[in-house]
Amino acid sequence: MSDVTIVGGGGAANRCYEVLSRAGFSLTRAFELDPADKSPVVIGEVHGAFLIARQALEAGRHVLVASSQALSTERLAILLEERTRTQALFVWSERRFHPAYRFVAGLVEADATWEPRFMRQQVLSRQPAGGPLASHVLLESVGLACRLAAGQPERVWARSIESPRRNFADLLTLGIEFSGFEATLQVGFGEALDRRETLIAAEGRRAFIDEVDQTTPIRLIGEEADGGPAPGARWLACPAPRLEELARQQCIAFLEATLDEKAAEREAALWQRSVDILRAVERSSKLQGAPVAVETGAALHPRLRVVGGRAFRPVPPTAA
């Protein structure tokens, strides 16, 4: 029996195969699931990738969706609802494992003065509005904010400029309020160039991350008491993020979560918060940018409850 099954192809799945093969894992490549196999599944670019992911979850298998085109917000919500507490469900995200974000995460974990209180992120993509990767870009950006906040989102406001040719926003600006932390994101599609820049601010300290700049992807800036730049401001160069290393980091995190129920639950909670935020973004956009409260997926889509052999869906309480 293999250690990992890789379904389909594509760049992400192929890199997973290469790094796991070099690490000595026993791998199986296929285009459909084997009912007798219960190994973790990496799903790449394959026809019906979403349906295959659902089948794998129903069979009790751990799933890494490495197909950026397979998931919309609602499809991810369905997968999250169908997973059990012990199952690992990961979504491919190379940006999350960028060396600069990992460096800042280490600072936050090791030094209490680096506790973030504000984030500003700008993402410009050459992908067309409403294209196959547009939903993935939004999920990835919101997921980075949720990971940095490490808490429950409370309110969201969003304004958008709709594409005249597609039912999708050319430019989306949104704000997310957490307890003690705020994030502002601007995501644009159909641009002439790619840009992925993030400013993370703590009390008296800032980190500026440029994911596209391979020479100086991160700059650390300190501030004096008067708000001016401190003499010790540093401009740092991290190692260039190689695609193989980004794949290796994701495979390690995924396989570790298959053995750690708490890690699997944290990952699922992160993506559930991202889904909840994007649903609130849609509601706020329809209200022309008015702030709306973030409702949890459980409140929006209650699970079926089996009583006396029959399934009932709980009815949310109505407002008095």
Image (spheres, grey):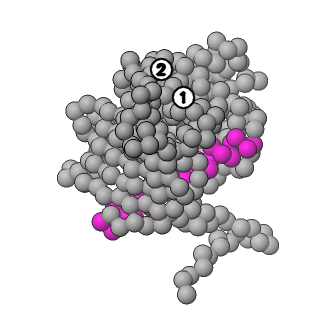
Residue type at numbered disc 2: Cys
Query: Within 10 angstroms of label 1, few (less than 14), some, or many (20 or more) residues?
Result: some
The residue positioned 30% from the left and 31% from the top of the image is 194
Q: Residue 209 falls in which quadrant of the image?
A: top left
Give the number of marks.
Answer: 2
Q: Earlier in the sequence, mark 1 or mark 2?
A: 1
Closer to us: 206 or 126: 206
Label 2 near label 1: C-beta < 8 Å? yes
Tell me which segment is drawn in magenta. 261-288
The residue positioned 66% from the left and 49% from the top of the image is 83
Q: Is residue 127 visible?
A: no
Q: Quadrant of the C terminus?
A: bottom right
> Residue 97's x, y, as percent?
53, 30
Q: Which residue is denoted by mark 1 in the rendering?
A: 103
Residue type at numbered disc 1: Phe
Task: Work out which residue is located at the far left of the displayed protein and give it.
Answer: 164
Q: Is residue 117 magenta?
A: no
Q: Which mark is residue 53?
A: none
Q: Is residue 289 above or below residue 90?
A: below
Q: Is residue 93 left or right of residue 193?
A: right
Q: Which residue is denoted by mark 2 in the rendering?
A: 238
The residue positioned 71% from the left and 18% from the top of the image is 26
Closer to us: 305 or 218: 218
Identify the secondary structure beneath mark 1: helix
Q: Is residue 188 left or right of residue 164?
A: right
Query: Within 10 angstroms of label 2, few (less than 14), some, or many (20 or more) residues?
Result: some
